[in-house]
Amino acid sequence: MSRFKNIDSKLSDLTIKLNGRLTKDRPSYPESLRTFEERRIDLIENGIMKAIIIQPNFEVNGVNSNIWNFINLAIYDDGLSISNPKWMEILVDQKDFSFIDDNIDKLLLKSEENLSNISMKDLV
């Protein structure tokens, strides 16, 4: 069973509100590379790609699904170049997934506030 079962409906609701796109577990990746769960809400506003990302911790030896991150990200243009100006705030850094589950309402509210207030001048 998905660890996201308690929060997927809230992610869907925010995705609709933001007119974004919700992706689950990197659907464009080959099946053999989809070894972990994650969620991502993406949207583009005024030439800025914005995202809310919930993912396990990526480490030298692979993916650590015991600790999780909740990230807000904004990148100028299409986000394909690492040299593009960007802004990032990590709302949850390497915590047990239950922390995200228990605090999802606050995390989504803060994410919505963060991303709605981002403008070009914030991107570095």
Image: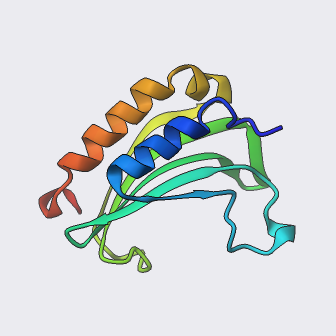
Q: How is the image coloured?
A: rainbow
- Left or right: 75 in relation to 61: left
Give me the residue at 37% from left, 77% from top: 78
Give me the residue at 16% from left, 58% from top: 119
* Residue nearer the viewer, 119 or 58: 119
Can the viewer see residue 66? Answer: yes
Corner quadrant of residue 47: bottom left
Corner quadrant of residue 96: top right
- Left or right: 91 in relation to 44: right
**Residue 21 image point, x, y percent:** 47, 61
Judge whether 108 appears above or below 103 on screen: below
Q: Quadrant of the N terminus?
A: top right
Judge whether 114 appears above or below 6 on screen: below
- Left or right: 115 in relation to 71: left
**Residue 11 image point, x, y percent:** 51, 42
Residue most toward the right? 32
Residue most toward the left? 121
Give me the residue at 78% from left, 55% from top: 62
- Counting the numbered discs, the total is 0
Q: Quadrant of the C terminus?
A: bottom left
Can the viewer see residue 72? Answer: no
**Residue 107 image point, x, y percent:** 43, 31
Residue most toward the top? 102
Give me the residue at 41% from left, 35% from top: 108
* Residue nearer the viewer, 71 or 107: 107
**Residue 5 image point, x, y percent:** 69, 34
* Residue nearer the viewer, 33 or 17: 17
- Left or right: 62 in relation to 68: right
Judge whether 16 appears above or below 106 on screen: below
